[in-house]
């Protein structure tokens, strides 16, 4: 279980292209910024692609934060993102992805997060995309996955590749932001219990999603 993202020539992805940038420090493309966070004691706890321009929803429009979670760690990340957006004045609705059944066409943005288990993004997130495809085409969508529980470069890259593979099956979807956050060992795991979530990186990602916030 993996629960839980210059100078020089630049490349702009085509509408159906979804290749991952190399996971290196200091590399930025014209459509994304890849960051590598290394807090004390943890080699890497977040891998983030951030948009070069944030969405600016009209005041009063809802931001939906939908999530899938097996043991609760992804739910906690979704709650942190929701709380951060609320602090900045946005109207936020937090809901499990499988329970979202009504129309989301009027949302300013949808943030969808789910863990990666055995190489696959949680099925509730994938079913959410299928169920709301027609509406999501007209809504800004940000995506995050809960990935590695091992801080090695290989595990981070593997989790990012797995999330990219899940998204590539939906060429109609063009997320404004994509992130892979560190995962958490399940409750029954042996000690030491690993938790690679970097809450500062998670909150920073939320800050970048929607710009400066609605007018006071």
Image (cartoon, rainbow, N blue to C red):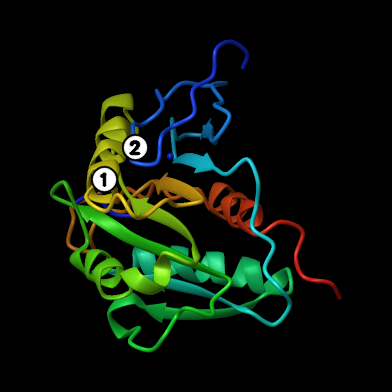
* Left or right for 216, reference 167: right
Looking at the rendered structure, which numbered label has been put on residue 18? 2
| Crowd tier of the residue under label 1, counting other residues whose Cα lies within 10 Å: few below 14, some 14–19, many 20 or above | some
Query: Mark 1 highlights which residue?
Result: 168
Looking at the rendered structure, which numbered label has been put on residue 73? none
Q: Secondary structure at mark 1?
A: helix
Q: Quadrant of residue 186?
A: bottom left
Q: Residue furthest right?
A: 216
Q: Residue furthest left?
A: 118
Q: Secondary structure at mark 2?
A: loop
* Left or right for 33, reference 2: right
The location of residue 170, given as percent across then percent down, is: 27, 53
Q: Quadrant of residue 124?
A: bottom left
> Residue drawn 71% across and 56% down?
211
Q: Is residue 48 above or below residue 93?
A: above
Q: Nearer the viewer, residue 61 or 143?
A: 61
Q: Which of the two labelled residues, at mark 2 and mark 1, occupies the earlier sequence position? A: 2
The location of residue 36, given as percent across then percent down, is: 50, 31
Q: Is residue 99 above or below residue 125?
A: below
The location of residue 190, given as percent across then percent down, is: 18, 52
Q: Residue furthest top?
A: 8
Q: Quadrant of residue 22?
A: top left
Q: Residue furthest bottom?
A: 102
> Residue drawn 64% across and 58% down?
55
Q: Where's the C terminus, which quadrant?
A: bottom right
Q: Is residue 50 above or below residue 188?
A: above
* Left or right for 141, reference 203: left
> Residue drawn 54% across and 66% down?
80
Asked whether the beta carbons under mark 2 and mark 1 sit within 8 Å of each other, the answer is: yes
| Crowd tier of the residue under label 2, counting other residues whose Cα lies within 10 Å: few below 14, some 14–19, many 20 or above | some
Spatial separation of the CA atoms under disc 2 and disc 1: 6 Å
């Amino acid at each position: 279980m993996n629960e839980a993202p210059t100078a020089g020539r630049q490349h702009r992805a085509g509408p159906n292209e979804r290749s991952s940038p190399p996971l290196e420090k200091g590399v930025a493309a014209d459509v994304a910024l890849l960051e590598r966070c290394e807090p004390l004691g943890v080699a890497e706890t977040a891998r983030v692609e951030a948009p070069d321009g944030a969405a600016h929803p009209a005041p009063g429009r809802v931001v939906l934060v939908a999530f899938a979670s097996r043991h609760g760690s992804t739910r906690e990340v979704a709650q942190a993102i929701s709380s951060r957006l609320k602090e900045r004045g946005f109207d936020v609705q937090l809901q499990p992805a499988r329970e979202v059944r009504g129309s989301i066409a009027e949302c300013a943005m949808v943030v969808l997060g789910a863990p990666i288990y055995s190489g696959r993004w949680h099925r509730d997130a994938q079913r959410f995309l299928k169920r709301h495809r027609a509406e999501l085409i007209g809504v800004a969508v940000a995506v995050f996955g809960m990935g590695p529980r091992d801080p090695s470069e290989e595990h981070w890259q593997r989790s990012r590749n797995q999330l990219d593979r899940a998204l590539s099956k939906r060429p109609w979807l063009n997320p404004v932001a994509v992130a892979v956050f560190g995962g958490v060992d399940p409750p029954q795991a042996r000690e030491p219990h690993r938790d690679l979530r970097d809450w500062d990186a998670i909150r920073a990602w939320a800050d970048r999603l929607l710009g400066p916030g609605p007018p006071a």
